[in-house]
Image (cartoon, grey):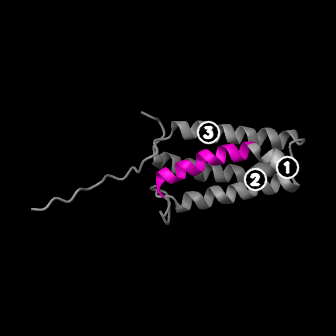
Amino acid sequence: MKPITSAMHGILDYAAAAFLVLAPSLFNLDGTAALTFYLLAAIEFVLALLTAFPSGVLKVIPVRVHGGIDLVTAFVIAALPWLLGISQQSTARNLLLAVALLVLVIWFMTQWHDDARRVSIRPS
């Protein structure tokens, strides 16, 4: 059994958004690198709000779909330093690669199903 429930994953997403929004200040990033982290933070936060996690607000994105988005996102984040022309900025590049690796590790450790108990209705 995977150790991270979808409920725990939802909480981790909010923590990740907080880290991503603070990263430019913590690691002295500016310009395109800082904007990249701010955009990733916003995307992470909105995705967490929209997912059917217990901590989600609108719950319009199924947990499994969120998992698929996270998997693709890990590879996109890993490519961002080269796609955005910031691969020469070692701090930004290394931080994005670390974030991508962490997203991938958490993806593998998460139980990608709804935590809500399903109720079956039987005719009487």
Main SS, magenta residues: helix
Which residue has dot 3 on it? 104
- Real-space CA distance between mark 1 and mark 3, rounded to the nearest whole angstrom: 23 Å
Amino acid beneath label 2: Phe
Query: Which is closer to the viewer, label 1 or label 3?
Result: 3
Of residues 31 and 14, the one drawn nearer to the viewer in this rendering: 31
Q: Residue at x 59, y 48 (%)?
A: 70
Which residue has dot 1 on it? 29
Find residue 54 and report its image quarter: bottom left
Q: Please determine whether, in this image, residue 2 is positioned above or below residue 8.
A: above
Q: Residue at x 54, y 36 (%)?
A: 108
Q: Secondary structure at mark 2?
A: helix
Marks 1,2: beta carbons within 8 A: yes
- The location of residue 18, given as percent across then percent down, is 66, 53
- Residue range in magenta is 62-78
Q: Secondary structure at mark 3?
A: helix
Q: Please determine whether, in this image, residue 7 is positioned above or below residue 39.
A: above
- The location of residue 58, given as percent across then percent down, is 49, 66
Amino acid beneath label 3: Leu
Q: First in sequence: mark 3 or mark 2?
A: 2
Find residue 37 and name its label. 2
Query: Which is closer to the viewer, label 3 or label 2?
Result: 3
- Real-space CA distance between mark 1 and mark 2, rounded to the nearest whole angstrom: 9 Å
Query: Would residue 63 be counted in the magenta stretch?
Result: yes
Residue extending farthest bottom: 58
Instruction: Estimate how packed mark 3 is, as few (under 14), some (14 to 19) or many (20 or more) residues with alpha carbons within 10 Å.
Output: some
Q: Residue at x 26, y 56 (%)?
A: 119
Amino acid beneath label 1: Leu
Q: Secondary structure at mark 1?
A: loop
